Amino acid sequence: MDFNLKNYQIVKLKKYFKNTDFFFLFHSAKLNLTRWTNTEQNLKKLKLSYYKPLNRTTVKTFKSSIYKNFSSSIEGFILLINSNYKKTGLELQSVVKNLKPSFVLIGVKLNNKIYSTSQLKGMKDLSYKKNAFHLHKALDKYLKTSYMLTNTKKISK
């Protein structure tokens, strides 16, 4: 295997996408050393880890993958942030609020799909169980109302 930097970074990024089911994609500003150290400490307090791939390799990898529709939104420095612990529940609003001064959320990768910020507007939690429960409650409510509407109609012959 050729271990030059670009090929190695591309392989590493593909492996990261394949092995990590859930992470945030953030645009990050170019920070000086002291601000970056403060940002790293803030990420550590929030129990988050990060991966910062190279710009060109990220765009090249996205264009040749199943995420090619999302590659147009990648311009500049990208930071991939995920939780250190699999069992802890994350609140989307608190993560974005704590990282807002330095980063801008552009998407969330969940399983094999990347969701943009416009698709995540109604979500408060990133817990599968809680979201499935809310979906079940909504479906139950709408099925009951549709049953009531169809039950009251009388069919004439």
Image: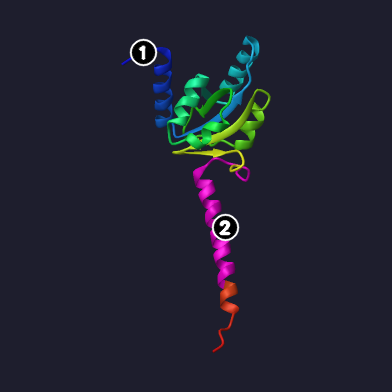
Q: Position of residue 121 (x, y in %)?
A: 63, 43
Q: In the image, which disc is placed on residue 138?
A: 2
Foreground of the two, 124 or 100: 100
Foreground of the two, 102 or 95: 102
Mark 2 or mark 1, whichever is nearer to me: 1
Q: Please identify the quarter of the rendering in which residue 144 is found.
A: bottom right
Q: Secondary structure at mark 1?
A: loop
Would residue 134 be counted in the magenta stretch?
A: yes
Q: Please identify the quarter of the rendering in which residue 141 is found.
A: bottom right
Q: Secondary structure at mark 2?
A: helix
Q: Position of residue 116 (x, y in %)?
A: 57, 38
Would residue 157 be counted in the magenta stretch?
A: no
The residue positioned 62% from the left and 10% from the top of the image is 33
- The secondary structure making up most of the magenta span is helix
Point out the tag, 2 or 1, that comes first from the N-terminus. Answer: 1
Q: Where does the magenta region start and end? A: 121-147
Q: Position of residue 12 (x, y in %)?
A: 41, 22
Whether residue 110 is situated above or below residue 42 in the rendered picture? below
Q: Please name the residue that numbered disc 1 is placed on.
A: 3
The residue type indicated by label 2 comes to Ala
The residue lying furthest to the left in this view is: 1
The residue positioned 43% from the left and 33% from the top of the image is 65
